[in-house]
């Protein structure tokens, strides 16, 4: 999966697997977290948001099942 490098709040990279509907998020402390069941529309809105960190906190962080990968 390609990760898009970002510098927004605690986010450092984001990536999306459309087939699996999983969002991968890398944080500034190098944690990599996978969010399951994320629709493509949410990914599109996140990746184009003017305030990525705010969009992530408001619409993803507590809305989807998370699993720490590293």
Image: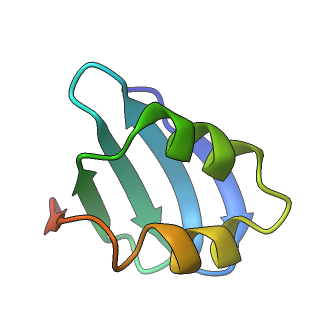
Q: Residue at x 56, y 79 (%)?
A: 58
Q: Residue at x 47, y 32 (%)?
A: 40
In the rendered image, the residue lying farthest to the right is 50
Identify the image quadrant of residue 12.
bottom right
Question: Relative to residue 29, is residue 44 depicted above or below?
Answer: above
Question: Relative to residue 41, is residue 6 depicted above or below?
Answer: below
In the rendered structure, the answer to whether residue 6 lies left or right of residue 12 reads right
In the rendered structure, the answer to whether residue 66 lies left or right of residue 58 reads left
- Quadrant of the frame with the C terminus: bottom left
The color scheme shown is rainbow
Question: Relative to residue 2, is residue 54 depicted above or below?
Answer: below
In the rendered structure, the answer to whether residue 36 lies left or right of residue 11 reads left
Residue 43 rendering spot, x and y as whole percentages: 53, 42
- Quadrant of the frame with the N terminus: top left
In the rendered structure, the answer to whether residue 35 lies left or right of residue 60 reads left
Residue 39 rendering spot, x and y as whole percentages: 39, 39
Q: Residue at x 26, y 19 (%)?
A: 19
In front of the other: 65 or 29: 65
In the rendered image, the residue lying farthest to the top is 19
Q: Residue at x 54, y 53 (%)?
A: 13
Residue 14 rendering spot, x and y as whole percentages: 51, 49
How many numbered tags mark residues here?
0
Identify the image quadrant of residue 65.
bottom left
């Amino acid at each position: 999966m390609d990760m898009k490098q970002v510098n927004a709040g605690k986010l450092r990279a984001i990536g999306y697997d459309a087939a699996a509907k999983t969002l991968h998020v890398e944080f500034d402390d190098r944690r990599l977290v996978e969010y399951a069941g994320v629709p493509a529309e949410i990914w599109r809105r996140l990746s184009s948001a003017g305030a990525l960190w705010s969009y992530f906190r408001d619409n993803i962080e507590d809305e989807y099942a998370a699993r720490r990968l590293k």
